[in-house]
Image (tube, rainbow, N blue to C red):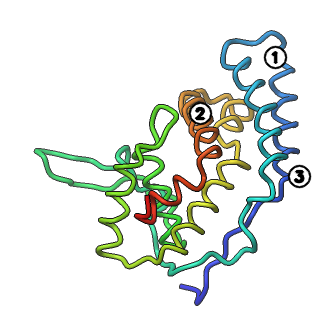
Amino acid sequence: MPASATAEVTEPGRAVQKADRLAGAVSARGAGDTFDVAAGVALEERKILLDKHAHLRPEGNAPAGPHGWTHGDFQHRNLLWADGELVAVLDWDRLGGRPYAEEVVRTAQVQFGVEGVFDLERVSAFVAGYRSVIPLEAAALVDGARRLWWKRMTDFWQLEFHYDRDGRSCDDLFIADEALLHWWTERLDVVERALTGAA
């Protein structure tokens, strides 16, 4: 494991280029279907969000707090249960060295960011439980949250899957994640306080 972790912070212009490329793919379909219409609107709205909130992106490529080996996608969909007991953890393709804070924030987002909002009470309880085993400073959690938020702001993986690979299995995730991104963006401070137990 390297002595320090790095985490790329995508430049707003690069994210806008990705959005424009995907908007071109949407336009190429003509009238398209309801997902194409939703994707086209979302891409235009995302460019507005990027312009409006670029000043809030994380500074530098050195995340705060400890790092180490993490699963990379630890969530309910990757847990296999039998007779009420956990028997396997699946989907190890993202195993890698990462900041613990970003991993715990990501897990909280996947678990408790449903129907376009965070369940902040459950987020706080989950992170407090994690911190009772793995000590994480509040500053590391705020940094991890801001980095994950910016990653979500600049990433279009579900649309790339849909338009570049003709994969539709993540379409519902895109719609839900897009709603959550807007909700989260309007409440950055509230979410960060919930993660640190200061809410």
User: What whole-number distance in Å separates the C-alpha atoms at marks 3 and 2?
Assistant: 22 Å
144 in relation to 29, above or below: below
Left or right: 110 in relation to 54: left
- What crowding class fits label 2: few (fewer than 14 Cα within 10 Å), some (14-19), or many (20 or more)? some
Label 2 is placed on what type of residue? Ala
Q: Residue at x 89, y 52 (%)?
A: 13
Identify the residue position indicated by label 2 in the image.
179
Q: Which residue is mark 1?
A: 29
- Nearer the observer: mark 1 or 3; the answer is 3
Quadrant where the C terminus is found in the figure = bottom left
Judging depth in this view, the residue of 99 and 55 nearest the camera is: 55
Residue flagged by tag 3: what amino acid is it? Gly
Closest to the observer, 94 or 154: 154
Q: Answer with mark 1 or mark 3, whichever residue precedes in sequence.
A: 3
Q: Position of residue 94 (x, y in %)?
A: 52, 60
Decide: is 98 above or below 166. Answer: below
Does 182 sit left or right of 52 as displayed? left
Choose the circle earlier in sequence order: 2 or 1.
Answer: 1
Q: CA distance from mark 2 to mark 1?
A: 24 Å
Q: Could you say where residue 42 lies in the image, as x and y percent from the top left?
A: 73, 29
**What is the crowding at mark 1: few (fewer than 14 residues within 10 Å), some, or many (at least 20)?**
few
Q: Nearer the viewer, residue 45 or 161?
A: 45
Task: Looking at this view, name the residue that lies furthest to the left.
Answer: 83
| Residue pictured at 74% horizontal, 59% vertical | 56
Report the residue that reaches farthest toward the front: 199
* Amino acid at circle 1: Arg
Check disc 3 and report the residue beneath it. Answer: 13
Q: CA distance from mark 1 to mark 3?
A: 25 Å
- Residue 94 versus residue 77 in the image, above or below: below
Left-right relation of 173 to 136: right
Q: Mark number for residue 94?
A: none
